[in-house]
């Protein structure tokens, strides 16, 4: 397999703020394995860096790819895992590129290769933390979406939800990005629910290490609690399966589609909900995730829509739904 890559700078149309930090610009890796394309947006929250990803690719992943046929995707994934549990965004790029390559080799879309029906899936549109009037405007500017994800966790959530409810009565998903203590989360969520209807779930109310806190929240609020920062891979179910109602899969955390599929099956066996999320990333990575979106309960695949300009075209988002195309592989063109 011929392995090439380049780095590309991507910029958000406006600063994208969450409880923990803000994204304006970042440099990603666009990976090409033969005809297959993949994307790695280094997950800085977990200590990943662009250079670390490049070194891991060159030193550790290249020899694995040289020893395998691309159709051996499970073996490739497992060997990358065995070398390190980290560097998941570059592993995801490799995994995406291989699925893209397999699809292009067979002349079929990846979802078809995986036996997935390409039903249009509803995605949320994410409203980042900002001045309240700007958050309201953002909802109004994206009035064709059927559900919004509201970033909370900095203390003014009642005021934020009240303002959002002035401009829409559509379902809202809340994401606190580790911003609360467990007690605070229970109090705030129940206060919000007393005043406002149609709140779908709360994502990562407490710090990632606070599994007991997640469980406390789950037991004391009537809406589903979804783990994001506390959950990366299959093995994490061992510590959080009974502490949450569901998990948020992101390809950049799981290391790609291969692991994401395993997580979906395990979650079903455990009776848990599945959310599929993303990073600020291009239509390449979003199209990769969209291939498996018909399998999940909640899709949150809007990272490409936050970009000032997107170097790729792929899955189409129309009226808040994701439409997969019939091009081979991930269905992405430059
Ligand atoms: Mg989240």
Image (spheres, rainbow, N blue to C red):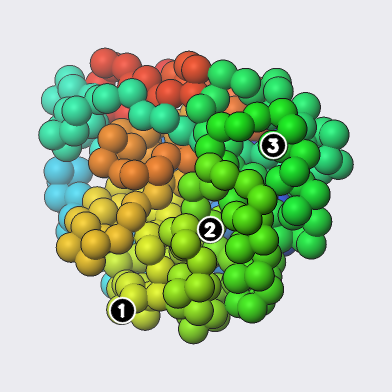
In this view, 135 is above or below 104: below
Nearest to the eye among marks 3 and 2: give it. 3
Considering the image in quadrants, where does the N terminus appear? top left
Element type where label 1 sits in the image: helix
| Residue at disc 3, secondary structure | helix
Please state the horizontal and vertical placement of residue 86, each as a whole percent of the image: 45, 68
Residue 316 percent across, percent down from the top left: 44, 19
Circle 1 residues within 10 Å: few <14, some 14–19, many ≥20: few
Measured in 3D between alpha carbons, the distance from the residue under mark 1 to the one under mark 3, in whole angstroms, is 38 Å
Distance Cα–Cα, label 2 vs label 1: 19 Å
Q: Is mark 2 within 8 Å of ligand 1?
A: yes
Which residue is disc 2 drawn over? 203
Q: Is disc 3's CB within 8 Å of ligand 1?
A: no
Q: Which x, y percent locates residue 234? A: 30, 67
Q: Which residue is mark 1?
A: 238
For the point 32% across and 17% down, which residue is it? 325
The answer to whether residue 116 is left or right of residue 6 is left
Residue sitting at x 40%, y 75% = 243
């Amino acid at each position: 397999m011929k392995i090439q890559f380049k780095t590309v700078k991507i910029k958000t149309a406006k600063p994208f703020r969450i409880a923990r930090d803000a994204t304006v610009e970042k440099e990603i890796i666009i990976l090409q394995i033969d005809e297959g394309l993949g994307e790695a947006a280094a997950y800085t929250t977990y200590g990943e860096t662009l250079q670390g990803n490049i070194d891991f690719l060159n030193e550790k992943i290249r020899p694995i790819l040289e020893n395998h046929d691309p159709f051996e995707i499970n073996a490739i994934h497992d060997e990358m895992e065995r070398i390190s549990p980290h560097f998941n965004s570059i592993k995801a790029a490799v995994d995406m590129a291989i699925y893209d390559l397999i699809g292009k080799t067979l002349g079929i879309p990846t979802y078809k290769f995986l036996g997935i029906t390409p039903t249009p899936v509803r995605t949320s549109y994410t409203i980042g933390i900002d001045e309240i009037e700007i958050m309201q405007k953002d909802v109004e500017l994206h009035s064709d979406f059927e559900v919004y994800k509201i970033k909370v966790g900095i203390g003014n959530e009642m005021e934020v939800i009240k303002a959002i409810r002035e401009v829409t009565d559509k379902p809202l998903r809340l994401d606190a990005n580790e911003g609360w203590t467990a007690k605070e989360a229970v109090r705030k969520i129940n206060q919000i629910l007393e005043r406002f209807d149609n709140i779908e779930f709360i994502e990562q109310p407490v710090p990632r290490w606070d599994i007991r806190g997640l469980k406390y929240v789950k037991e004391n609020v009537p809406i589903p609690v979804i783990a994001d920062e506390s959950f990366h891979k299959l093995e994490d179910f061992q510590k959080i399966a009974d502490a949450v109602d569901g998990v948020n899969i992101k390809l950049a955390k799981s290391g790609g589609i291969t692991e994401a599929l395993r997580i979906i099956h395990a979650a079903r066996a455990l009776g848990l909900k599945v959310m599929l999320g993303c990073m600020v990333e291009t239509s390449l990575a979003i199209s990769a995730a969209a291939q498996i979106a018909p399998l999940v309960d909640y899709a949150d695949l809007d990272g490409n829509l936050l970009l000032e300009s997107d170097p790729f075209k792929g899955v189409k988002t129309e009226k808040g739904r994701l439409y997969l195309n019939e091009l081979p592989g991930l269905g992405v063109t430059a």
